[in-house]
Amino acid sequence: MKILVADDEKNLRRVLLTELAEEGHEVAEAENGVQALSLLEEDEYDAIVLDLTMPGLGGIDVLRKLRTFDIPPEVIILTGNATVPTAVEAMKLGAYDYVIKPCSLEELNALLLKAYEKKRLRRENLALRTQILRQSARRKIVTASPVMRDLLDTVMKMAMSDLPVLISGESGVGKELVAYALHDMSERAGGPFIPINCGAIPENMLESELFGHEKGSFTGAYARKPGLLEIASRGTLFFDEIAEMSLRLQVKLLRVIDTKSFFRVGGTREINVDVKFLFATNKDIKAEAEDGRFRHDLYYRMSALTLTIPPLRERKDDIALLVEHFTNTASSPGQKTFGKEALRILTGYSWPGNVRELKNVVQRALLLSRNDAIGPEDLPADLNQRPAQPGNTLQDVEKNHILKILNEADGQRGKAAKILGIDPKTLYRKLAGYSRKS
C-alpha cells in the first residue's frame, strides 16, 4: 500500500514512517497541508494519515480539496481530541476514520488495511459503472450459420490467451459482440470490459480518455483523472475503428502493448496495468499500413491473433433467426410476426449494412405495421423490389440501393447512413469509390 503521512510534528511523522515501512508499506511524508496536496497531485496514494491541526492549510482544507479528485486516497484523521467538532466535520467530508494521538500502530495499520480495501472496491465500482454506461449495445450472438459456429469455436480458443486479437469485418457485422464474447469466455470475465471508439473521439480527447491526465496538464484539467487503461486493468480494453487512430497515438499505444505501462498526460510517474487488448476495423488494415496510414509495427503487434467476421449476405441462414430475435427483444414486444413472403424478401436482400441494417428494418416494421402478420407492404420499398436482372453484380445492387436511400434522404449523408444502419464514414468511403469509378 502507498501511504502519505501528513503531520507537522516531525518526531511523530518519522516514527510513523519507520513503523509503517516495516509493515511493508511504501510511505512518503509531508510537514503541512500545502506540501501534502502537492504530493497528492504529483502521485497517487492509496491512503493518507492526515493531521487535523497543521499551520497554514489544515486537515479540513486538505479534505475539501480531495473531494475534487476522481479517485481520492482514503483518509485516516489524526486528532488530539476525538470530541472536537472538526473531527465530526472531517468524517462528513469523507474521512474513513480517525485515531487519537498518541495512536497505537496496530490500530492505525488495521484501519489503513480496511481503508485500502474500501478504495479497491471504489475503483472496481468505477470500472463497473463505466462498463454499464458503455454496455447498452451488448447482446448475445445469435447464429445458425456453420461458418459463424466455426468462428465461435475459434473465439473460445483465443479467449484463453492474453495475446492481442484483431477483429475485422464490414460495418454492422457484430465485431463488438465478438469482442464481448472473447472477454466473457476468458479468465478476465469478472473484470471490466471497456470499449472505446477511436473514430468517434477527437485525437486530443482520445489521448486523455485513454491515458488519463494530471491536474493542470491542459486547459480544463482541474483534477487528476484516471484513463480507461487504468479502469480496464485486470479486464479487457476494446479499440473499435482502430484504423482511425492517429499515427502519434499509435506510437504510445504500441509502447503500452509491449510494456503494459504508460504515463498519464502531463504525468511523470509510470503506471503499470494488466489489460487484454482487442482491436476492430472495417478497413483493410494491412493495406493501410502499406500505404503509410497505419504503423507496420503496431499492425504486426495487434494482429497476433485475427478473426474475420463474414458479412450477413454470406450467412443467410442467420436472417430468419435474427428477425425472430429482434422481434422478441423489441422495446414493446407484441404479437406481431413476419410472414413467409416478408422473410423471403429479407433473405434475398444483400444487406450492405449487415446485422445493424437488418435490426433497423425489423424495428421499423414492428413500429409502423398495422397488421399482426408483417408482409411485403410493411418493408421499405427498396427491399420489396424484384431481384436484380442477370448480369448485375452484388456491388451494383448495393450501389443502387445506397444511391436510392441517399436520394430519399435529400442528399443528407448522415441521415442516409442512419437509415442504412452503417457508419457515416463507411458511407462516405463507398460514395467516394463510386465517384472514382464513374
Image: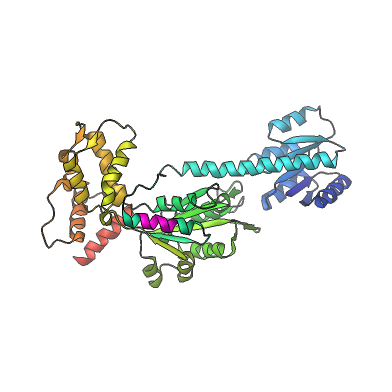
Residue 135 in percent (x, y) is at 45, 44
Residue 395 in percent (x, y) is at 21, 60
Is 224 located above or below residue 163 in the figure?
A: above
| Residue 152 colored in magenta in the image | yes
Q: Nearer the viewer, residue 87 or 53?
A: 87
When asked about the image quadrant of residue 280, the answer is bottom left
Range of magenta residues: 149-155
Residue 64 in percent (x, y) is at 68, 37
The tally of labels here is: 0
Residue 358 visible in the snapshot: yes
Rendered residue at 72%/30% (across/down):
89
**In the image: residue 397, left or right of residue 172:** left
Rendered residue at 27%/51% (across/down):
317
Rendered residue at 53%/41% (across/down):
129
Residue 70 visible in the snapshot: no
The residue furthest left is: 389
Looking at the picture, the colour scheme in use is rainbow
The residue furthest bottom is: 290
| Residue 387 colored in magenta in the image | no
Is 295 located above or below residue 94 in the figure?
A: below
**In the image: residue 326, left or right of residue 408:** right
Question: Is the magenta region chiefly helix, strand or loop?
Answer: helix
Q: Nearer the viewer, residue 35 or 248?
A: 248
**In the image: residue 355, left or right of residue 200:** left
Quadrant housing the C terminus: bottom left
Residue 380 in percent (x, y) is at 19, 43
**In the image: residue 402, left or right of residue 211:** left
